[in-house]
Amino acid sequence: MKGRALIAGGSLGGLFAANLLRELGWEVDVFEKVGDDLASRGAGIGTHAELVAVLAKLGIAMDERLGVAAGERICIDRAGRELYRMHWGHTMSAWANVYRPLKDRFPADRYHFGKSLSRFSSDAESVVAHFDDGSSARGELLVGADGLRSAVRAQLFPGLEPAYGGYVAWRAIVEEDALAPALRDGLGNAYWFVIPPGEMMLCYQVPAKDPGRAAPARDWNVVWYRPVGAARLADFCTDASGRGHGTAIPPPLIRADVVAQLKEDAHALLAPQMAELVERSRPFFQAIFDVESPRLAVGRVALLGDAAFVARPHVGMGVTKAALDALCLSNSLGQSADLFSGLERYGALRGEFGRRCVARARRLGAYIEARSRPELAWTPAQLDQSPQRVLRETAASLSEIPEFAP
Ligand SMILES: Cc1cc2nc3c(=O)[nH]c(=O)nc-3n(C[C@H](O)[C@H](O)[C@H](O)COP(=O)(O)OP(=O)(O)OC[C@H]3O[C@@H](n4cnc5c(N)ncnc54)[C@H](O)[C@@H]3O)c2cc1C
């Protein structure tokens, strides 16, 4: 069966779905809230063989523009001494490097910027997406790929709110060219960890985003998970004029004193080479949330990617999960006699996977959450932040993860 699919959200999840449904013969329109190209956003992402396979299905190769191989995972202490090392042949990529080919592959005149879905309505024959600007679009299927704060999810499940995990991820990209040669050589192509009490800092190489730089240019992607209680998060999200931005402040508005404190803490808590990376960065932070949708398909509406489930980033899987959701949606629609049985199949298969992802990621982040919520009961296993455990569990490929076994 075929028809017109309306996709709310034109990030990676929306673009995977848009391209795959188009391959299936659907007429597809993407409606993205943001007014212009998204390529300037995002940072590093981990990849999995399953993500590479979905990209390949769309004719996109994981070549050196898209991916950089990390050789080993190494954990060092505050003084820079090695604590643990494991071999890990894995490809790291960057958000924009996956976005760009997916976006370029989709017809520009069917990708509508500046269209924010406010609500939808449906009847037996169709679904209508209504946008903030008063316009609307009618189709046979609506896909909510509108991320953490999904308007589609909010309408399907009123009152279901993302749950704050009690910590934030500071993130930054540092151009390799900006690093002193000794630091660059010392970092090599390893995936580095420092694990201060109740925290996790990591960094790895990603392909450079700027196409103007000589290939194969590299950047360093920095992520530092730090416990931040709810009151302090509200302060972090207050700009210099005193205006609060809820739980997500736009990066340019993060106050200078909040960044200065981070850099001071880097010198106190991290190995010198990691502190130098933080010092040279223009960091921003994202609060870490969990979301579990009770169902992924209701009537003519399906949720996918972060609109469906948000797992904390320790499973390194947000983009892979979004790609696999989109693949399962298109396979389910392709194989089923009608839309509703296709959506039911999709919901059953991806719902279970999403719930397992959220649970695993919550477990991997428990020792960080515990720091800002000491009043909760935590087991010794949850508080285990030994380098062996952290490096091994966050490195596992999908096929090795016990929680995902059929
Ligand atoms: C610190 C951190 C590290 C991460 N590391 C990794 C990693 O290593 N590997 C990995 O795979 N993933 C990682 N992720 C997760 C990854 O970024 C997301 O899971 C992934 O991008 C999911 O894509 P999505 O399209 O579902 O949602 P999003 O990328 O959030 O996109 C949603 C889109 O919908 C648009 N939108 C929102 N509301 C509306 C509306 N009402 N109407 C129309 N459009 C709307 C938004 O503007 C946005 O473009 C990380 C996340 C964080 C926070």
Image (spheres, rainbow, N blue to C red):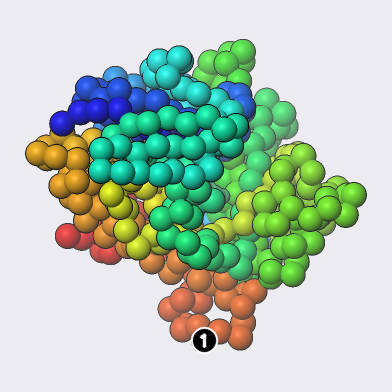
On screen, residue 154 versus residue 374, left or right, reads: left
Dot 1 falls on a residue whose secondary structure is: loop
On screen, residue 60 versus residue 162, left or right, reads: left
Query: In the rendered view, would you say 226 is above or below 138?
Result: below
Q: Residue at 25%, 43% (x, y): give it.
A: 124
Identify the image quadrant of residue 89. top left
The percent position of residue 338, horizontal first and vertical second, equals 14, 40
Residue 358 in sight in this render: yes
Circle 1 sits on which residue?
A: 377
- Name the residue type under label 1: Ala
Q: Residue at 46%, 76% (x, y): give it.
A: 382
- Ligand 1 within 8 Å of disc 1? The answer is no
Q: Nearer the viewer, residue 128 or 48?
A: 128
Crowding near the residue tagged with mark 1, few <14, some 14–19, many ≥20 C-alpha atoms within 10 Å:
few
Count of marks placed on residues: 1
Q: Residue at 47%, 62% (x, y): give it.
A: 158
Q: Residue at 67%, 57% (x, y): give it.
A: 247
Quadrant containing the C terminus in the rendered view: bottom left
The percent position of residue 383, horizontal first and vertical second, equals 51, 76
Q: Nearer the viewer, residue 50 or 23?
A: 23
Residue 85 in sight in this render: no
The percent position of residue 230, horizontal first and vertical second, equals 69, 69
